[in-house]
Image: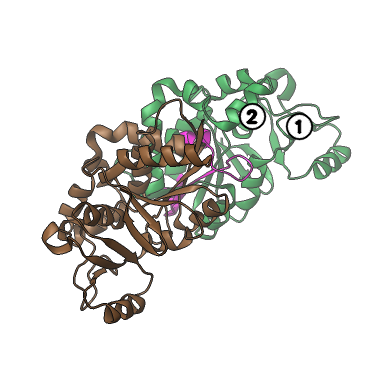
Chain colours: A green, B brown
C-alpha cells in the first residue's frame, strides 16, 4: 500500500499529527535527536524526556543512579551530569544506564505528540533506519507518517527541514505519496546532500551553537546513517526498537 | 545596508509580517499573482482585490465598466467576465481597464497584509523585477522583507515555496541576510530551476488545476521573468510601480 507522508514545520503541529492518527517522527537534529540516537547506540537502556528542570531534578533525586542530562540555552544546567552534546554520550558513560533528559525544543515536540500511538525519534545519524521502520510500521498499520520538525524556540529551522528531507529520501520510491511540504524538504535535501555540513552550518541554530563552542557536535550530527538505531517514545520513555 | 529576508509559509502569517513593519511580497503563483502580473503587463489600469463574490458583484453593479473576474474552486463564477487564468488577460481584453478580482488564497493573503506600508505581488513571471524593487525599497526604508506564500486553502504549497526561492535567488548576494525559511526555499529552487515546470507539476494544487483543464496556465505561470512588472497593493488597489 501507498503511505502518505507529510512534514510539519513546528513542534506544536505534532498535536495535529497525533489527532490524525499518524505515525510521528520527531526531528531535532541539533542536538536532542542526535543525542538520543547516540545514547541508545552506545547502550543506554532508556531515556526519560522531561519538560522542566524541576521535574528532571525530582526524578533524579528519587533515582540517583539515573544520569541527569540536558540543556538550557544550549548549556548544561548546574549540577547536571551531562549536557546535550551527543559526543558526551560515550559507551563508558551511558551503557546500561537510564538518562533523564530535558531540552527545550526536542522535549517540547515529544510532549505535543504524546497522544500518538507511534512516536519515533529521527536524526541525520539514523535517517535510513527511521525511514525503513516508519514505512514498515505505517504500511502494516494502514496509517500516514508525519515528520515533525522540533524547530528552534518555536520557529522553523533549516537543519530540521534538511533532516526531514534526508529521511524522506530513504523511503521506498513508489511506496509513498508526498505532501507538498514533504516534497519541498526532499528537494532542498537533494540539493545539499553532498555538502550537508556546510549547509547546516548556515542555519541560525548552528551559528549559535558555533558561538557556544559546539562545532564538533554539528559535524558529528551531520554524519548521515552512522547508527542503524530506531528510538521509540512510549509510556513516557524512549528506548530502542529491537 | 543588509536587508533581512524572511519567508512565511501561510497567508495568515502576513499579519505578523505587517506587524513587524516588513515590506511584504505576496506570492500566489498558481494563479492569482500570475494573473495580476499578466493583467498589468497587458495594460490593465488597476486591480481591486476583494474577498467575497457579493462584494465583487456589488462593486461591479456600481461600476459596470469594470471587469468582473476571479474564481471559486478554480472555476469562473457565474456571470463573471473573466476567470483566474492569466492567459485570459490579453491586451485586447484588459488594456486601460479596471478589474475587480476575487480569488480564494491570493485575495486572503492580501487581506491579511493590509496593515503593511509596502505590499508587492510576486510570481515566477516577475521574480527578478520583484527582487530588485523589494531590495531597493527595503534598503532605502531600513526595513526587512517578508515573502508570504498564499498557499492553498490555508495550507503550505510547493509552488509558492519554489516561487519564494526564485525571488530570493535574484536578490543581490551580500546585500541580504536570509532566515532559515528563506534559505530553505532558495535551496529547493536552486535544485529545480532548470526543470521548474515538472517540479511545480508535482504540487497538489497543480495536479488539481490539471484535472480542471488548466495545464496551459501552469506552463505559462512557470515562465520566469517574462514581465519586468512590479505590482503594488495600496489603498485597496493593485497597480504597477512605474
Secondary structure at badge 1 equals strand
Residue carrying label 1: A69
A38, A16: nearer the viewer: A16
The picture places residue A28, in percent across and down from the top left corner, at 58, 36
Side of A106 where B139 appears, left or right: left
Q: Are marks 2 and 1 in contact (CB under 8 Å)?
A: yes
Residue A177 visible, this orientation: no
Residue A149 on the magenta segment: yes
Above or below residue B122? Residue B64 is below
Residue A121 on the magenta segment: no
Location of the C terminus of chain A (image quadrant): top right
Count of residue discs: 2
Residue at image position (57%, 41%) is A151
Using the image, name the chain to which the residue with label 1 belongs. A
Residue B138 visible, this orientation: yes
A96, A11: nearer the viewer: A11
- What is the magenta range? A137-163
Which mark is first along the chain, 1 or 2? 2
Side of A101 where B47 appears, left or right: left
Residue carrying label 2: A35
The picture places residue B74, in percent across and down from the top left corner, at 26, 65
Residue at image position (72%, 40%) is A48
Amino acid at each position: 500500500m501507498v503511505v502518505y507522508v507529510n512534514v510539519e514545520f513546528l513542534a506544536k503541529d505534532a498535536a495535529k499529527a497525533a489527532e490524525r492518527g499518524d505515525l510521528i517522527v520527531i526531528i531535532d537534529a541539533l542536538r536532542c535527536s542526535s543525542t538520543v540516537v547516540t545514547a541508545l547506540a552506545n547502550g543506554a537502556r532508556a531515556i526519560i524526556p522531561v519538560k522542566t528542570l524541576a521535574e528532571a531534578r525530582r526524578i533524579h533525586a528519587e533515582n540517583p543512579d539515573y544520569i541527569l542530562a540536558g540543556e538550557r540555552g544550549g548549556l548544561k544546567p548546574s549540577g547536571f551530569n551531562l549536557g546535550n552534546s551527543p559526543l558526551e554520550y560515550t559507551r563508558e558513560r551511558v551503557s546500561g544506564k537510564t538518562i533523564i533528559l530535558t531540552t527545550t525544543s526536542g522535549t517540547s515536540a515529544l510532549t505535543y505528540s504524546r497522544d500518538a500511538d507511534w512516536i519515533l525519534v529521527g536524526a541525520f545519524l539514523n535517517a535510513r533506519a527511521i525511514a525503513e521502520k516508519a514505512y514498515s510500521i505505517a504500511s502494516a498499520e494502514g496509517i500516514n507518517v508525519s515528520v515533525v520538525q522540533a524547530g528552534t524556540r518555536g520557529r522553523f529551522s533549516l537543519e530540521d527541514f534538511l533532516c526531514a528531507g534526508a529521511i524522506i529520501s530513504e523511503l521506498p520510491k513508489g511506496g509513498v505519496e508526498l505532501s507538498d511540504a514533504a516534497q519541498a524538504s526532499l528537494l532542498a535535501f537533494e540539493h545539499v546532500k553532498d555538502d550537508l555540513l556546510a549547509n547546516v552550518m548556515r542555519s541560525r541554530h548552528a551559528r549559535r551553537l558555533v558561538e557556544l563552542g559546539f562545532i564538533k557536535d554539528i559535524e558529528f550530527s551531520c554524519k548521515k546513517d552512522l547508527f542503524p538505531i530506531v528510538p521509540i517514545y512510549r509510556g513516557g520513555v524512549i528506548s530502542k526498537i529491537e
